[in-house]
Image: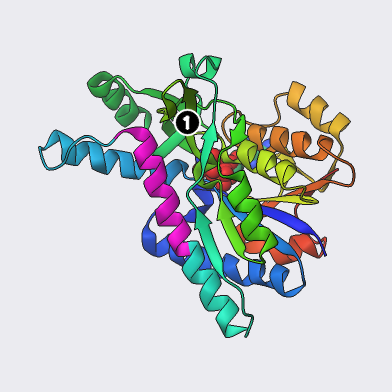
Amino acid sequence: MAKIVVALGGNALGKSPEEQLQLVKHTATSLVGLVAAGHKVVISHGNGPQVGAINLGMNYAAEHGQTAAFPFPECGAMSQGYIGYHLQQSLQNELHQRGIVKDVASVVTQVEVDESDAAFQHPTKPVGAFYSKEDADRIVAEKGYTFVEDAVRGYRQVVPSPQPKSIIELKSINDLIENDNLVIAGGGGGVPVVKTPAGLKGVPAVIDKDRSSALLAANIAAEQLIILTAVDAVYVNYGKPDEDVLRELTATDAKRYIDEGQFAPGSMLPKIEACLEFVASGSNRTALITSLDRLDDALAGKVGTLIK
Ligand SMILES: Nc1ncnc2c1ncn2[C@@H]1O[C@H](COP(=O)(O)OP(=O)(O)O)[C@@H](O)[C@H]1O
Ligand SMILES: NC(=O)OP(=O)(O)O
């Protein structure tokens, strides 16, 4: 029996509420399988596409005089509620179907960042939809947003992504875990906040959920961090004719591949770095990267990349 943090990728959660609910329902089967096997499971999730969509919608409504402007941290909090709702419902239904009595709760989570983090001057976190180069250029000219090419999928808006320092609701999360709840926490990497003389204050950014999940996993003394994304494993020469799967990765090999530029910044690189950080944070800690729909196969050692 182990304590496991499972992080679900925002990009792997589909493009609409309907798609997301279907994908989450499917993943809930494997997650409840872990619970049924006696593991203590804590779930975190990304929010890149979702917070981008919420922000676009709120901006549109505000520009058309329909609502007040909604700052980015509030959009992040909304994304935690939206994704947490789908997760809670799917997990509750699956638990009920299997006759397992367990409560499920999402914790709206704030994560402390440093106001002077250099990331605020260099936006790197892709959010929202993927655009063609022409559409991205038009939006940059109209709104002044920053866009980058994201992996092999198109152009995407980027926002600052500061390092997570501490999890504000850590004690509540630990209490819920110890009281045998199935906990969802650190959604979207947590709502980024800074400590000011007047108290906590939200800041416009998106923390990388893989880094926050690694911090959460280390803080709750988990044995394993599982990152579920859109690819079944990590590859070298990804997307090229000679791509090759990495089934096991040591810290030494991972660092060599990082130096070779094998992992795209803003997508696979933060996952690898988060896994390395978690594995180094204690003894007997491993990390696993696979896709949302292959978790069972990955746990059986058939697919995925194990980092140790
Ligand atoms: N070396 C690599 N191996 C596998 N996938 C990679 C690699 N480099 C970049 N990627 C891309 O990283 C994506 C996962 O990152 P991302 O979409 O940001 O994850 P999520 O939103 O699920 O957390 C994959 O779907 C793939 O397109
Ligand atoms: N916040 C975050 O890391 O989201 P994604 O998983 O969607 O990139």
Magenta extent: 71-86
Q: Image quadrant of residue 142? A: top left
Image quadrant where one finds the N terminus:
bottom right
Q: Which residue lies furthest to the front in this view?
A: 198
Q: Image height check: is 30 above or below 283? A: below
178 vs 275: above or below: below
- Please give the count of numbered marks on the rendered protein: 1
Q: Can residue 23 be seen in this view?
A: no
In the rendered structure, which amino acid carries the disc numbered 1? Val
Residue in the image at 41% along x and 48% along y:
79
221 horizontally vs 180: left or right: right
Q: Identify which residue is drawn at 80% across, 32% down.
A: 254
Residue underneath mark 1: 193
**Which residue is more in the foreground, 20 or 203?**
203
Q: Is residue 80 magenta?
A: yes
Residue 271 within the magenta-colored segment of the rendering: no
Quarter of the image that includes the C terminus: top right
Query: What residue is shown at x 78% (from left), y 62% (from top)?
Result: 299
Residue 108 lies, in percent from the top left, at 47, 49
User: In the picture shown, does residue 220 fall above or below 21?
Assistant: above
User: Looking at the rendering, which quadrant does residue 37 occupy?
Assistant: bottom right
**Residue 59: x %, y % from top left:** 23, 36
Secondary structure at numbered mark 1: strand
Residue 57 seen: yes
Residue at (68%, 38%) from the top-left corner?
215
Residue 44, horizontal then vertical, whole percent? 58, 51
Picture quadrant of residue 97: bottom right
